[in-house]
Image (cartoon, helix red, strand yellow):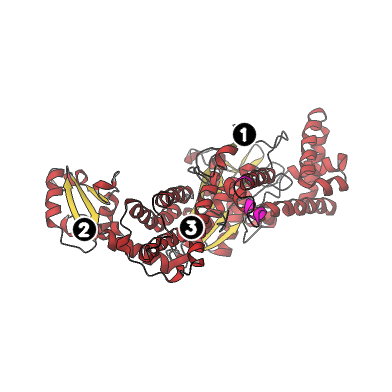
Amino acid sequence: MYNAKMEISKILAPLIPGLEPNQIYDMLEVPPNPEMGDLALPCFKLSRILRKSPVQIAEELAAGIPADENIDRIESVSGYLNFFLNQNHYIRQVLCHIMESGQAYGSSDIGKGKTIVIDYSYPNIAKPFHVGHLRSTSIGNSLYRLYKFSGYNCVGINHLGDWGTQFGKLITAYKHWGSKEAVQKNLIKELVSLYVKFHKEAEKDDSLNDEAREWFLRLEQGDEEALELWQWFKDISLEEYQQVYDLLDVSFDSYHGEAFYNDKMEPVIQKLKDKNLLKESEGAMIVDLSDEDMPPCLILKADGSTLYATRDIAAAIYRKKTYDFDKCIYVTGVSQNLHFKQWFKVIEKMGYEWHKDLYHVPFGTVSIGGERLATRTGNVVLLEDLLNKAIEKTLEIIDAKNPHLENKHEIAKQMGGGAVIFSDLFSNRIKDVSFSWDEILNFDGETGPYVQYTHARTCSLLKKAEESGVNAEELEFDSSLLNSKEEYQLVKSLAEFPEKVSQAVEELEPSIITRYLVNLAQAFNRFYHNHSILLEDKELKHARLTLVKAAKVTLYNGLRLIGLHAPERV
Ligand code: ARG
């Protein structure tokens, strides 16, 4: 596709000694006001290199640029060099490219031959899938889709929290107060109340803690009864998580959780010893990181059991061996920053040069109406409940707006779930997120339903056109008819998509796509509200329908990249 920024950088490069096209590319800006052109070069950025005033530079460049069929005119205004593209040419090239590419519009093969491992979601077994895991799930899922769309081979891993002393507590609680029937009936909710009860009772009776330690030890040693209960808790939890994953349209290539590495830790510890990295400290074994200004990384507890970091080290080594990744990225809350920094350092000290390919992708906290979400107290918001509430509320809105909508339960699912994911992905991931029902479900706001609704609007226009005998797949169109401000702005917005995709991949930031989609939907709706589309005038109708089709393609591709469905009717 014609990339105006790139082409203009190439035209300018021979006129600016000492700068490469890519350096000029980075200097080009989109002026705040379209009357000032489509792209501008702020020449004060060149003053130092060229030893001239910005005004003089702009004047000289304007006079020196050879004629180009894609550029209508160039103006030098107060030290800015403003470029006005040939609209007709530009619109034609952008729309033809989108129509030809279809579902591949925005994709690339920059990742060809490279493998990315993404570690995300990872609910903790026997604990509810709470809203905090939603962020990891939606960010990880979107990154997975973005990488795939850019040609990478992706491996999505659900690093389940399926090991740890909490299982000793849970088994103890189950043995004292649990029943098979209650667990089978209430599933994770029952496991959580057993866990909560354990903590309450253990405050009064410390011997319960000893019992829990005992059970965990038995579990680690492969005791049959302990293992059987653990497996049962795990199966029950996974079954329940699956409902959430189905709702969110998320799947994984591997469910190897922490327990999977139980038998892979010996060689790691051996290697740490061989490299002289293990030190004893208060009975525990650690890797000293004081030379890095970090607290030590705990590898073995005094009783010989391994820790969270030990598992992560073993898992990274296993993943490198199994997938030979180019990058392995971990999507977790910002509170785990230090944990990742520490064990990435340990990997480096062990001599693995691929330590530089490990990336922690942190995100901020989630709250609902200002309340943070905790599990230990039992004050939890289950993701499933949250999603169901979103779906219920969406259904109410659909019933009010379009009560005869076919398949409305399915669509309410896609929009309700979408609303939650969208709001989760709207801000930069590092920011804290707070849900407010009115905000996330507003069909006119910066929301998932708004973008989905806009996409459905493009579909219904195309469907109506088709019913009147127009084949949207084979539209001949005269781009010179798309000469209004709104049409040009919409085309420019459409043309930004591929660059937004590569930016999102580079910055590991799905919010770039989420925000882009809102802008695109707004540009589409400005066009839609100011211009009739299904007109008598066949030529104009075809030109505008081409624009509608290109918007549909781009909205669809963008929604899929952030993990949302794009229903054709809402
Ligand atoms: N299960 C952990 C938690 O809920 C996060 C796991 C993240 N992945 C990893 N490889 N450490 O906090």
Viewer-nearest of discs 3 and 1: 3
Residue 372's disc is: 1
> Which stretch appears magenta?
400-413
* Nearer the observer, 219 or 56: 56
Can you identify the residue that label 3 sits on?
458
* Nearer the observer, 95 or 510: 95
Q: Is residue 2 visible?
A: no
Inter-mark Cα distance, 2 to 1: 55 Å
Inter-mark Cα distance, 3 to 1: 39 Å
Q: Secondary structure at mark 1?
A: strand
Amino acid residing under circle 2: Asp
Can you identify the residue that label 2 sits on?
72
Amino acid residing under circle 3: Thr
The picture places residue 423, in percent across and down from the top left corner, at 54, 44
Residue 405 drawn in magenta: yes
Determine whether, in the image, residue 114 is placed left or right of residue 277.
left
Label 3 or label 1, whichever comes before in sequence order: 1
Residue 70 drawn in magenta: no
